[in-house]
Image (spheres, grey):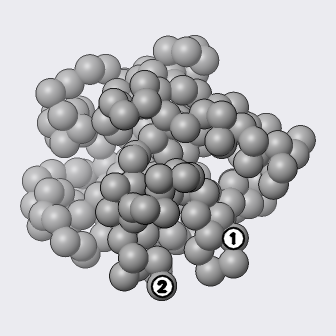
Amino acid sequence: MIAIILAAGLGTRLAPLTGFRPKPLINFQGKALISYHIDNLKRMNIQHIHINTSHGHLFQQFIEAAHPCSPITITHEPYLKPLGTLEGLINIKNKHQLSGPLLVISADIFTQIHASMLITPSTDGHLFLIHGPSHDFSIENNRLTSGSLTYSNIGIFQAESLCPSQSFKSFVLTHHFTASILDQHWLNVGDFKTLR
């Protein structure tokens, strides 16, 4: 399986820290946020990791220093005009002609991804949901529907199903996605309160 780490956000809530480096490269509990994902994915024997970012040169320097010889590709987005989740995935899929299931995770999520999450969905994809602040999705008979749960920013997408849509939410709700609860510690590192 191939993994995609979405890391193109501007991190405005962590300014001025993010004036010099993107949020996924900020130190969190001992190492850069994105390094937790890279280390976990390597332990899971992921074939290749793609990082989608609008800070390409900074990520390239970091990867060469902190994760040399790792199977990682940096894919660029326009600076100051980062693509949304769905557009970022389509950007990577098209540039690298990806196919099959893709494990996708946002770089600013702090959680423990593990091998049991590497399912191959028989549908267009699978989302991991949490009891969180937004109320977008729910699960009925293992299927994704509208409801009171939050997307954890971790999912598996069949590359062939990715296509432009009005929004990420409309895309996943109009396609055939399964879903499950992510039952473990999860933190969206978005501001100084969560960075502590």
Residue at the farthest right position: 69
Q: Is residue 69 left or right of residue 131?
A: right
> Which quadrant, please, contains the N terminus?
top right
The three-letter code of the residue at mark 2 reads Arg
Secondary structure of the residue carrying numbered label 1: strand
Q: CA distance from mark 1 to mark 2?
A: 13 Å
Q: Which one is nearer the viewer's eye here, 100 or 6?
A: 6
Q: Is residue 7 left or right of residue 28?
A: left
Q: Is residue 81 left or right of residue 45?
A: left
Q: Is residue 84 left or right of residue 119?
A: left
Q: Which residue is at 48% across, 85% downward?
A: 196
Question: x, y (%) of residue 30?
Answer: 69, 78
Q: Which one is nearer the viewer's eye here, 19 or 83?
A: 19
Question: Compared to 71, does 138 lie above or below?
Answer: below
Residue at which label 1 appears: 31
The three-letter code of the residue at mark 1 reads Lys
Question: x, y (%) of residue 15?
Answer: 39, 61
Tag shown at residue 196:
2
In the picture, residue 96 is in which quadrant?
top right
Q: Which residue is at 69% across, 70% downward?
A: 31
Q: Which one is nearer the viewer's eye here, 115 or 191?
A: 191
Tag shown at residue 111:
none
In the picture, residue 95 is in which quadrant?
top right
